[in-house]
Image (cartoon, grey):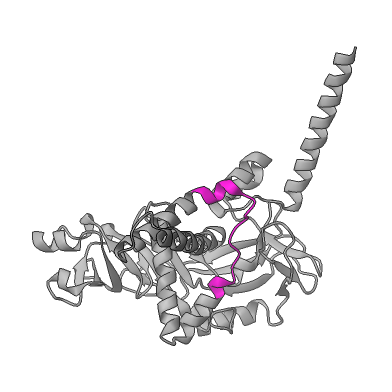
Amino acid sequence: MLHGKSARFPPGATVYLLKGALTHLPQDQQDALTDELASVKSFDVESDLWEVAPSRPQLGGGSKSVLVKEQGMRLAFCILAQHALPGGGSDRSPSIVAANRALAPKRKIKRSPTPNGSKACGGGMLALEDITPGEGLLTEHPFLLSSTGVEHRWSDRWRAYLTMMGGAQYGSAPAKAALARFDALAAGDPEDVESFVEPRAKATEIVESALRSAGKVPESEEYEEIKCQQVEKVLTVLMKWQANAHLYRNVTNGDMAGAAGTAVAAVYSLIACVNHSCRPNCDVAGTWSAQKPGSGDANDGAATLTCVSAVAAGEECVYNYGPRELLTWNLEKRRRYLSEKNGFVCRCERCREEESNKDATTCTVSLSLASIEDK
């Protein structure tokens, strides 16, 4: 991860150049580059500017790179395909391989072949033996990053998927691995209809825009048939992002790993297999080094799954997808949050218990009212 003044970007990350990034450039370049995409190359300490490569060099005056201000950069997406390769907990970097060996010389968890209901089609991770609190179970880097909490996040995520597909088609082994990992992820809970409303609307916008660019005539029979098919494909991709993305926070100084004030979402290949629970026995925490402008740290953003309460052999390892305070919320608020942010209705053990107690209370009250009316 490359360090700037307060933000961090992986080399090669795709960013938007907003107006604030370009105010030091001639007006014609500002006009040409505003809202354009560029690839991150390095951070120049002397000028406090980032070197980026515009996706369309002709807009930057023909230059292959341009220096821009940090406050006007916003992450679109980044594909860290090497982290999807098998080995070392989905990451082949020596430091992460060493960390996994130190944490779990003998892997103590495995993927569950069947889902348990806490997250639709999510599978899960089972303990192979008794695990004690404080034990680290795995460490890995994300293989995908994207914007979150902003209007363009849906198109950013679809663009990232198309980029992975392109790399895979050109024969890139890391891109093929990343695409396979992503395609294997759960796509939310189809029974949670409300969580699909916004993604479906955005998928429709993406497809309609692509069809217009391809010259397809709206309202024709061919147009509607292609549109319906493609909307479902795009929707599946967007829901996989929604259901599996985790907030990617620089916990050292509170900034995100993107432009100041901009949230970033990360997708991990193994941690994505760990189900959510409102009664977690594990936790996930990121690793971030101190901010050193102009430097880089390959370990930034690595996440470790750690046991926080005893887990028996055969029991599922689960953690809380939401903020820590989610565990203090009532059933309705927890489910609403997870539906909106992750695309599923939580059916973990705690939620099912509270739902049963609620139903039992409602039934008792109804019977009491009925007896009063009879009298």
The single residue placed furthest to the front in the displayed view is 221
Viewport quadrant of the C terminus: top right
* Magenta stretch holds residue 187: yes
Q: Measured from the top left, where is residue 138 in percent x and y?
A: 63, 73
Q: Measured from the top left, where is residue 2 in percent x and y?
A: 36, 72
Q: Residue at x 49, y 63 (%)?
A: 229
Q: Measured from the top left, where is residue 23 in percent x and y?
A: 15, 57
In the rendered view, tell whether residue 369 sits above or below residue 248.
above
Question: In front here: 39 or 152?
Answer: 152
Where on the picture, by quarter, is residue 21?
A: bottom left
Question: In front here: 12 or 42?
Answer: 12
Question: In front here: 292 or 248?
Answer: 248
Question: In front here: 221 or 87?
Answer: 221
In the rendered view, tell whether residue 34 sits above or below residue 297.
above
Q: Is residue 260 left or right of residue 146?
A: left
Residue 254 visible to the viewer = no
Q: Is residue 296 left or right of residue 181?
A: left
Q: Residue at x 76, y 67 (%)?
A: 132
Viewport quadrant of the N terminus: bottom left
Q: Measured from the top left, where is residue 8 in percent x and y?
A: 37, 66
Q: Is residue 177 left or right of residue 253?
A: right
Range shown magenta: 181-197
Where on the picture, by quarter, is residue 19?
A: bottom left
In the rendered view, tell whether residue 35 sits above or below residue 112.
above
